Image: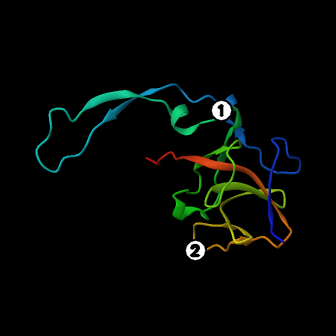
Amino acid sequence: MNATLLILQPSQPGVSQVPLPLAQYPIPSARPEISHRISAGFPSPAADYTEDGLDLNALLVQHKAASFFFTVEGDSMRDAGILDGDKVVVDRSVAPLHGHIVIAVIDAEYTLKRLYCQRGRVELRPDNPAYKSICLAEGSELQIWGVVTGVVRKLRV
């Protein structure tokens, strides 16, 4: 018998945190994108030019109505480049697959981990060796809330 995945519905009762829906917090429209390469030799006169605008909605959000922000707490996904305080973009319309970084619900709490599904085994794995994987027992259900599709980080200056 294998562990099974359960995709949670949007209004799942009993979950403590509340994600921020992107549909209610629009990202500003396209911003100009400057393309510039750093040369170690002679500078190019065409090095600085403006490309088409960079639309953060188009870059980060594929399905606006199904996308949400979560704020990351902790460093269990550090080696995936996801750090404490980052915002992750989570798309509920993407089917979770082996290797995806997902938001799962365990004991009414959200957790951010990499989904591992092979040979009948289902695990949630951290991307930091200081943490242990969460192994699911045979016959148990794993509740997947959504799949992480992007990371937003504000640098401290």
User: Residue at 63% across / 67% down in the picture?
Assistant: 126
Reading the image, the residue beneath label 1 is 64
User: Residue at 55% across / 63% down in the picture?
Assistant: 78
Task: Give the x, y percent position of residue 128.
Answer: 57, 69
Q: Is residue 41 left or right of residue 129?
A: left
Q: Amino acid at mark 1?
A: Lys
Count neighbours of disc 2 (C-alpha within 10 A) and say few if under 14, some if 14 to 19, many if 20 or more.
few
Q: Amino acid at mark 2?
A: Pro
Q: Is residue 83 above or below residue 130?
A: above
User: Residue at 38% across / 27% down in the picture?
Assistant: 52
Q: Count the marks: how many? A: 2
The quadrant of the rendering that contains the N terminus is: bottom right
Label 1 vs 2, first from the N-terminus:
1
Which mark identifies residue 127? none
Applied colour scheme:
rainbow
Task: Give the x, y percent position of residue 134.
Answer: 73, 70
Reading the image, the residue beneath label 2 is 129
Q: Is residue 66 left or right of residue 75?
A: right
Task: Give the x, y percent position of residue 157.
Answer: 43, 46
